[in-house]
Image (spheres, rainbow, N blue to C red):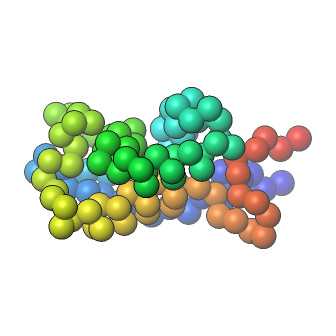
Amino acid sequence: MSNELEKVESEKVTLKIQGREREIKFGFSAWAKLEREFGGIKNLNKLQKKIEEEPFTTIPKILYLGLVDKEGVTEDNILDEYGLNDMQFVAERFNKALYGSLPKDDGKKAGLEAKK
């Protein structure tokens, strides 16, 4: 029997933060925090809306959740090395890390529903 989590084939995503290349990975704990913040996995469309409405506060906050090595980094300084000209690059890394950690859609609706 196939497990939805086995379908996750994300590649390593890194971003230069505080002078070092650091891995951004959205594992189970990060998804659990997102789930709590947005009132359940079914409400993740609220996440996309929040990113569109408040990108300069939302993207750093979510990146921080997925940051593997948090030493010397806070939500407030995580993107200090980047400016407005870098937003497309940061958004691409963010999307790759966040959405690349979801199970692949094999013709069914992708989701993290428990199987009986």
Residue 78 percent across, percent down from the top left:
22, 43
Residue at 22%, 36% (x, y): give it: 76
**32 lies left or right of 105:** left
Residue at 76%, 44% (x, y): give it: 113
The answer to whether residue 77 shows anywhere in this view is yes
> Where's the N terminus, which quadrant?
bottom right
Task: Give the mark count.
Answer: 0
Quarter-wise, where is residue 109 in the image? bottom right
**51 lies left or right of 85:** right
Residue 4 percent across, percent down from the top left:
71, 53
The answer to whether residue 32 shows anywhere in this view is no
> Where's the C terminus, which quadrant?
top right
Residue 23 percent across, percent down from the top left:
32, 51
Residue at 57%, 29% (x, y): give it: 36
- Picture layout, residue 30 above or below residue 80: above
Residue at 46%, 46% (x, y): give it: 50
What residue occupies the far right of the structure in this picture? 116
What residue occupies the far front of the structure in this picture? 53
